[in-house]
Image: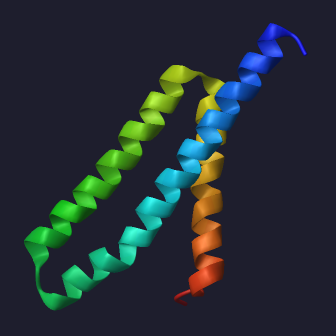
Amino acid sequence: MTALTSNAAVTATVGLVAGLALGVLHFASLSWNAQLFVSGSFGAAIALQAARVGLAALVLILLFRVGPFAALAGALGFLVARAILIWRHGDPQ
């Protein structure tokens, strides 16, 4: 394996792990966010929503700065985490 391909593999792995962790955190906190909205705690719900979206944007921007392999793998990990959580907890529709 050359240095370029090993570097791409490492950055893609880092991106995938970061995307999976971010996705699990993002989508698992969605039910907490919905409970806050339903209970009438609109300020806390909006603050949590802003934190969820802001953290997701920040991590994905950082992955884009690392490189294209990290960014693509991070986005893939984010979507895989969503699919896993939907499969585990059921589709709300």
Q: Quadrant of residue 4?
A: top right
Residue at the image point whose x is 87% and y is 10% from the top: 2
Q: Residue furthest right?
A: 1
Q: Quadrant of residue 82?
A: bottom right
Q: Nearer the viewer, residue 8 or 92?
A: 8
Judge whether residue 48 can be spotted in this image. Answer: yes
Question: Which x, y percent locates residue 35?
Answer: 26, 85
Question: Which x, y percent locates residue 32?
Answer: 31, 77
Name above or below for residue 69 compared with residue 56: above
Q: Is residue 10 left or right of residue 49?
A: right
Name above or below for residue 10 compared with residue 91: above
Q: Quadrant of residue 5?
A: top right
Name above or below for residue 82 compared with residue 7: below
Image color mode:
rainbow
Q: Quadrant of the N terminus?
A: top right
Question: How many discs appear?
Answer: 0
Question: Which x, y percent locates residue 72?
Answer: 65, 37
Residue at the image point whose x is 16% and y is 89% from the top: 39
Judge whether residue 72 can be spotted in this image. Answer: no
Name above or below for residue 88 compared with residue 47: below
Q: Quadrant of the C terminus?
A: bottom right
Residue at the image point whose x is 64% and y is 69% from the top: 83
Question: Which x, y percent locates residue 19?
Answer: 55, 47
